[in-house]
Image (cartoon, rainbow, N blue to C red):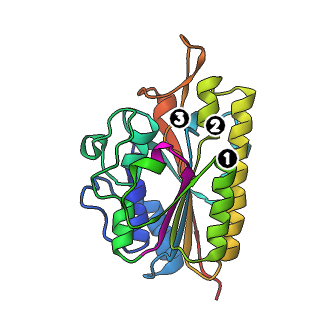
């Protein structure tokens, strides 16, 4: 099974940008194939990536109808494995560099600023205007600092969503990555299928729908891609009786990414 590292080469090839030097993955063929059908030889001009924390494939069987709404927006799916250990900074470092933890240097729960070349670096070098919108001081807000991109550190998920919509409306950017964390926060306090967690899951799925509407409204004149890309899953720690992740259990490793390609309105 391919790993979440496929995200970086997929975005780079869609936008016809050279991949980072340390990328160790290949772009998703099903996404590139659909891009060729839709756009011929033309590049994707705009990209919105929504990265909800810990929404692993273990949720799909119980909430198929809910995740089918994601698929309506982004119908190209890829079943992927996270990297080890399945912690947020480890996974996002690999996802947005295309490199495995041995190369990124982040192998455990820690938040150093990455020194390897990332998707953000190569996009900026290619002249793309990029924004990373996340909750202040979370992993993704910290480890990609120092790049020639815009950073928006928000109080929590709702503000991340509102900021992302505003950035879409302003239409000054080419790539936006938006991160939400409520589900992950709550699973550590409760259990992966607790009422609180499932409410948070619903919030993330609704957020993707809201962002997709803004994406299609404000970026309608561009060849564009939207993606739903969780970092890892979670499991019930029977000793603590709370949710956790970090292991190589399938519940932690397996994620499904969704991609939607849209042709510009002439």
Total numbered labels: 3
Tell me how far mark 3 sits from mark 2, CA to CA. 10 Å
Viewer-proximal residue, 152 or 173? Answer: 152
Magenta stretch contains residue 149? no
Question: Crowding near pointer 1: few (<14 within 10 Å), some, many (20+)?
Answer: many
Q: Position of residue 22 (x, y in %)?
A: 25, 55
- Residue 246 lies in what quarter of the image? top left
Residue drawn where x is 39% and y is 40% of the image: 111
Q: Position of residue 126 (x, y in %)?
A: 35, 75
Left or right: 205, with 249 as reference point: right
Q: Give the range drawn in magenta.
A: 128-140
Does residue 133 lie above or below 91 as drawn?
below
Secondary-structure class at tag 3:
loop
Magenta stretch contains residue 139? yes
Question: Crowding near pointer 3: few (<14 within 10 Å), some, many (20+)?
Answer: many
Viewer-proximal residue, 142 or 93? Answer: 142
Residue drawn where x is 67% and y is 71% of the image: 216
Does residue 17 lie above or below 111 as drawn?
below
Secondary-structure class at tag 2:
helix
Name the residue tied to disc 3. 233
The mark nearer the N terminus, 1 or 3, is 1
Secondary-structure class at tag 1:
helix
Mark number for residue 183? 2
- Residue 29 lies in what quarter of the image? bottom left
Q: Where is residue 67 in the image (x, y as percent from the top left)?
A: 67, 46
Name the residue tied to disc 1. 204
Does residue 132 lie above or below 217 as drawn?
above
The mark nearer the N terminus, 3 or 2, is 2
């Amino acid at each position: 099974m391919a790993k979440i590292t496929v995200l970086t080469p997929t975005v780079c090839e869609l936008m016809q940008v050279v991949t980072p030097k340390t990328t160790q993955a290949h772009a998703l063929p099903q996404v590139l194939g659909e891009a060729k059908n839709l756009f011929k030889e033309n590049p994707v001009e705009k990209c919105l990536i929504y990265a909800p924390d810990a929404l692993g494939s273990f949720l799909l069987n119980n909430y198929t109808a809910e995740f089918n709404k994601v698929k309506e927006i982004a119908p190209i799916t890829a079943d992927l494995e996270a990297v080890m250990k399945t912690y947020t900074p480890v996974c996002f470092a690999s996802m947005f560099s295309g490199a495995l933890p041995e190369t990124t240097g982040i192998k455990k729960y820690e938040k150093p600023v990455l020194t390897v070349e990332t998707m953000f670096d190569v996009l900026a070098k290619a002249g793309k205007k990029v924004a990373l919108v996340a909750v202040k001081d979370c992993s993704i807000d910290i480890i990609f600092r120092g790049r020639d991109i815009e950073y928006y550190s928000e109080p929590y998920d709702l503000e991340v969503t509102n900021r992302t919509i505003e950035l879409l409306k302003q239409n000054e950017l080419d790539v936006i990555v938006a991160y939400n964390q409520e589900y992950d926060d709550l699973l550590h306090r409760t259990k992966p299928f607790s009422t609180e967690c499932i409410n948070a899951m619903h919030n993330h799925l609704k957020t993707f729908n809201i962002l997709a509407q803004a994406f299609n409204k404000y970026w309608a004149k561009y060849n564009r891609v939207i993606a739903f890309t969780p970092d890892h899953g979670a499991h019930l720690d029977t000793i603590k009786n709370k949710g956790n992740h970090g292991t190589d259990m399938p519940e932690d490793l397996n994620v499904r990414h969704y991609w939607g390609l849209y042709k510009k309105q002439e």
